[in-house]
Image (cartoon, helix red, strand yellow):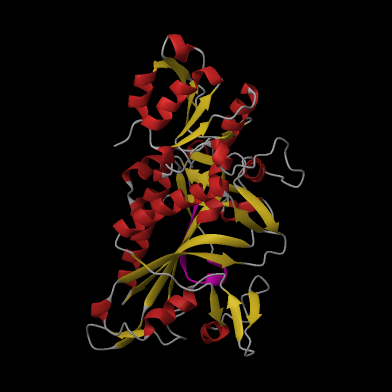
Amino acid sequence: MRIFKYYLPTLKEKPAHAKIISHQYSLRAGLIKQTASGIYSWLPLGLLVLKNIENIIRDEMNKSGVIEVLMPCVQPASLWRESGRYDDYGKEMLHIKDRHGSDMLFGPTHEEVATDLIRDTVRSYKDLPLCLYHIQWKFRDEVRPRYGVMRGREFLMKDAYSFDVDYEGALNSYNLMYKTYIKIFKRMGLTPIGVRADTGPIGGNLSHEFHILANTGESTLYYDNKFSELLESEDVESLKNIYAVADDMHDPKTCLVPQEQLNVSKGIEIGHIFYFGDKYSKPMKASVTSQDGKNVNMHMGSYGIGVSRLVGAIIEAFHDDKGIIWPEAVAPFRIGLINLQTKVTEAADKIYKALKSDEVLYDDTEGSIGVKFSRMDLIGLPWQIIVGKKAINENIVEVKNRATGEVKEMQIEEAINRFSTK
């Protein structure tokens, strides 16, 4: 993609109302634009990141055997009255009336809809286990939306819902999602820490939050330093049993981990998994016939990942004073190709044509060199190919690694071969 044909409204100055790095860089790099308080339009660059995150999640969910559906944003209040949550959820729920005066709501979550989806069609233990997921927009009317996409009112979430005949099956589903989450976050270049957590308004008695490490995180994590070793093995039972908690869940008096073995780090929550038994299936009459012929309420769990929140969280984890540093797996473009002067256009065009255009953002504008370098560092593409005067006589370009700042000279053909993908 050529920058002069692209919509990339970057900002030179830090917006006064943006208090944290991810909010500042999201606005400055042209990822988002605020439409209303806590509600954002996703601009082309930000949308590419969002879609890359979605694709990783979708790929790993599908590999785990979970089936994708798409449930509606707007839900009838009657389902929430069935479950008993309509009056209890609180002011974060956006209430709506349709033209017939029926009570509706913009879904903050989808447990009720998911339960209703299967209760009339899944009748036997032979139909289980079943796990469905979707990636859909949610709305929670935060009293004080802040931090950009980290805590907005409208947000994109991946939520999955598991249905099992008994606790043993539900625990297997829970463990599968725990392991799948580790794979998802590691593919994004992140280090996920799964901590024991409260279940909140969703309910249940088994719950883990997934956080990523970030110096500017809003949570404080306390975890055994053996966690990192176990993370590589993806041993779910060991990971669940190791000491790892956040904020007020940590009690120094009851923590048995030696002080020298206890890591204390800042983190950002990016996912949450719950097992809640028959909290929804019982009141909503979602039951199946068990193997011994009894009618039993399905055991359920739900599993969420904040897709749009991850954009902000990744920026918080990967940035410097020049801008964003995208992990390659989620970057909007893999390469920033910078043409420093008109005389080298032929060489720069050659590189652009040789590489996949959807992996390259080509800056062949007539702006100053300083502006080009600053803009490319700000938007944080993993690699920069810099085409200057050496390209004319010596056939040499510079290749810069955005994360390390390392710059290497390469022959043009070498650079093309380095970044060519089949």
Q: Residue furthest top?
A: 393
Q: Is 296 situated left or right of 225 in this image?
A: left
The answer to whether any part of residue 20 appears in the image is yes
- Of residue 238 and residue 61, the one placed in the foreground of this image is 61
* Vertical side of 27 occupied by 110: above or below: below
Q: Residue 413's quadrant in the figure?
A: top left
| Image x and y of residue 247, in percent | 60, 52
| Image x and y of residue 349, in percent | 44, 27
- Of residue 357 and residue 267, the one placed in the foreground of this image is 357
Q: Determine if the magenta segment contains residue 206.
A: yes
- Of residue 86 and residue 171, the one placed in the foreground of this image is 86
The answer to whether any part of residue 145 appears in the image is no
- Of residue 98 and residue 18, the one placed in the foreground of this image is 98
Q: Quadrant of the C terminus?
A: top left
Q: Is 381 situated left or right of 299 in this image?
A: right
Q: Residue 200's quadrant in the figure?
A: bottom right
| Image x and y of residue 14, in percent | 72, 39
* Vertical side of 181 occupied by 418: above or below: above
Q: How many marks?
A: 0
Q: Residue furthest bottom?
A: 100
Q: Residue at x 66, y 40 (%)?
A: 28
* Vertical side of 140 occupied by 74: above or below: below
| Image x and y of residue 361, in percent | 49, 35
Q: Determine if the magenta segment contains residue 207.
A: yes
Q: Residue at x 43, y 82 (%)?
A: 116
Q: Which residues are magenta?
A: 199-210
Q: Residue furthest right?
A: 16
